[in-house]
Image: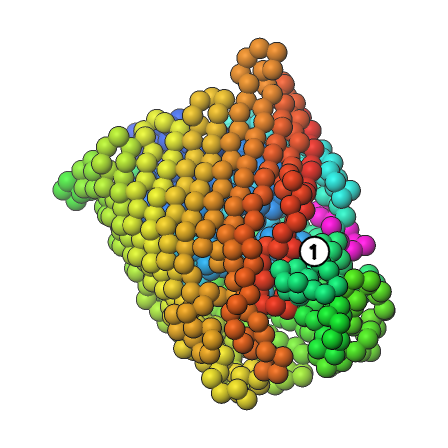
Amino acid sequence: MVFKFHRSGIAVAVLAAYALPAAAAVESKGEGPSQGRAELATVAVTAEAAGETATGPVKGYVAQRSAAGMKTDTPLIETPQSVSVITRDRIEDYGARSVNEALSYSAGVSTYGASSRSDWYSYVRGFSPNVYLDGLKLPVTKNAASWIVEPYLLERIELLRGPAAVLYGQGDPGGTVNLVSKKPALKPVREIELGVGNHGHRRLGLDLGGAIDENGEWSYRLVGFGRSEDLPTGPHASDRLLFAPSLTWQPSAATRLTLQAGSLKDDTDSSDNFLPAQGTVLPNPNGKISRDLYTGDPGFSRYKKEQQWLGYQFEHRFDDTLAFRQNLLLSKLDVDNNSVYGWGLSPLDPSRRTLFRLADIFNTSAKRLSLDNQLEARFATGSVRHTLLAGLDYQQQKLDEVSRNIPRMMGLFAPLALDLFRPAYQPITADRFGPQTNKTEKQEQLGFYLQDQLRFGPRWTALLGLRHDRADTHTDTTGASLNKAERDDSATTGRVGLVYQAGNGFAPYVGYSTSFLPYFQSNPDGSTFEPSRGKQYEAGVKYQPEGGRTSLTTAIWDLVQSNVLTGDPDALRAAAGYQVQTGKVRSRGFEVEAAAEMTRQIKLIASYTYQDVRNIEANGPAKDQRPTDIPTPRNIASLWGSYRFGQGVLNGLGFGLGARYVGSTQGARIDLVTLRPADYKLDVPSYTLFDAAVYYETGPWRFAVNVQNLADEEYVSGCQSDRVCFYGKGRSVVGTARYRW
């Protein structure tokens, strides 16, 4: 992977940051007073002995701390924003096979269902989440070519709801998902896991780690995972191979460096069939379209993905007051995608049984550099205690996309037409595709942020945050269309919050935060757009009794994103692909989420969300309607409970049962002439799904059977329009056997 820095100022800042770790490491080995070295060691040991850290393993369902909301080791109850932590135990008990599934019992999360191509068919408070791996941003691409993360790699998943630009820079305002990978530790880790399931599912997982030398200066972690299964529809399989080693060097209690690398390969096909509303949520004179229908092409369709990443996490604590951290991630993504998909009923067939299909060839390559420097100071001014965080981060991404497609009018005729009720697949050849389009997108961002957590006595905690960013975007398109666009933007974002520790574990809070997001898109004439802006007001109450294993968060929010792209009001310009920046989306709602270990045997997770997401400004009939390109159910509820026998002949036996309710959503009817939404009267019914698990633990062994969609409910998880509806996943059964030694 090769990254070039285009701005001399940015290069100087980054090079200066690189010089800091070496200097810090030298200082840690200096000839300072022995008393100072002893104090540093004592501080580190005390922190470790206290138990849970902000990013480390959590035993059970309830986390006490998280770094996602503050980038510091902060108790969740002191964070003036809604945060959820999905622990490793929860991921395993759910039997989650994707990040989508792991988030399904969290408040504020809606989804179109899992896909073999992407984790990110989930949405938070009505917006796409911003995705980070160990606090660093992953490549930003379209869903069809997005980064995917295997849950077996993860120690925990942190979900921060609402704008987070002060700490993370540009992004959508709905929320941030931080995926925390497994790290080296001194305690030995030796695990092998085998699994089998329906649809020919087979898996093998290997997790090894521990100290390398007797002094514990070096430790390692090696995570390997392989999986193969048949896709629910079509003739193709889905194969995955993951390899992720990491190494930690800790020469003293004050200095720690972790090196990480990884590779993931997927060989599959698209598992989300695009189906018309007539035959799924609306009547069709020919009956209901089968959930098993395959709309791709057996010989042409394919989806191959390769991901590599390399990075490090460095920390040096100078003394009890000052600490420096530097984290870096280089990531590379390559996707080879031949896609055939439905695009509504053919207007040439009055019998309403012929699917109009499109075909695309996409080859996507994305390279991203993410670098984050943090200087943290803990000190007091009078009676006020401060945790001051100053940061400088830099991000660079280059996205190359080569695409070809069959011109749309050609798709009105056979060989791309498909009989929905008696499918016959005709070969698709490359000579039917139009000219190639090459598109290159480049983006750089340099940001400086400052955050102060102020603690006034034992009750009050205030948060003040400010950030300034420069973002440069360049788009160059050649081939079927010629277009060049360049734009330099700057933005200042802020965040304030206040938490009151009322006693008995209760902590009411209020907060305000903002965001910004530059657009890669441009109009056909090369005209560019201002960044979108987001702002959110949030208030809530958290409950987390000291020493207890219960966590409860209730929150209300009012979130608005402005400068949203919407279709040009002029019909001819809209048909040519022109957009204007007059849209505004508002999300308001209430949510509650609880995690509790009521006894050593009983654990519960419960959540409820009411959200009202709508276009408050838009052109045409979209105004005052819910967005249709994302699922926006007004009501979402879930409940998961597990019980384990603790004694007698059933000791070690446990089971879990869960229910997920998703309210009705809305789609649009598309005008066949203008290809724009004509009205918003397409209603998608609500649905309820049940999940179950049975497991048995004895000695080093753990046996488990996880079932998702226990009743094999047939449901439509959403409709973007009357041309594009999705069936949800059917029943999934996986049995695993794990051995630890």
Tell me residue 659's x, y (percent): 54, 39
Q: Residue at x 34, y 62 (%)?
A: 535
- Scheme of colours in the image: rainbow
Residue wearing tag 1:
271
Image quarter of the C terminus: top right
Can residue 406 be seen in this snapshot? no
Q: Residue at x 53, y 29 (%)?
A: 642
* 722 lies left or right of 90: right
Q: Residue 672, located in which quarter of the rendered image?
A: bottom right
Tell me residue 320's x, y (percent): 30, 37
Q: Residue 13, located in which quarter of the rendered image?
A: bottom left
Q: Residue at x 82, y 78 (%)?
A: 431
Can residue 661 be seen in this snapshot? yes
Q: Residue at x 76, y 59 (%)?
A: 294
Residue closer to the observer: 580 or 318: 580
Q: Which residues are magenta?
A: 232-243
Q: Secondary structure at mark 1?
A: loop
Tell me residue 41's x, y (percent): 37, 30
Tell me residue 230's x, y (percent): 77, 48
Instruction: Reply above or below: 183 against 370.
Output: above
Q: Amino acid at mark 1?
A: Ser
Is residue 235 a member of the stretch shown in magenta?
Answer: yes
Image quarter of the N terminus: bottom right
Instruction: Reply above or below: 543 against 428.
Output: above
Extreme-front residue of the structure: 285
* 455 lies left or right of 449: left
Extreme-left residue of the structure: 382
Sort mark 1 into few (<14), some (14-19) or many (20+) by Cα contacts within 10 Å. many
Is residue 485 a member of the stretch shown in magenta?
Answer: no
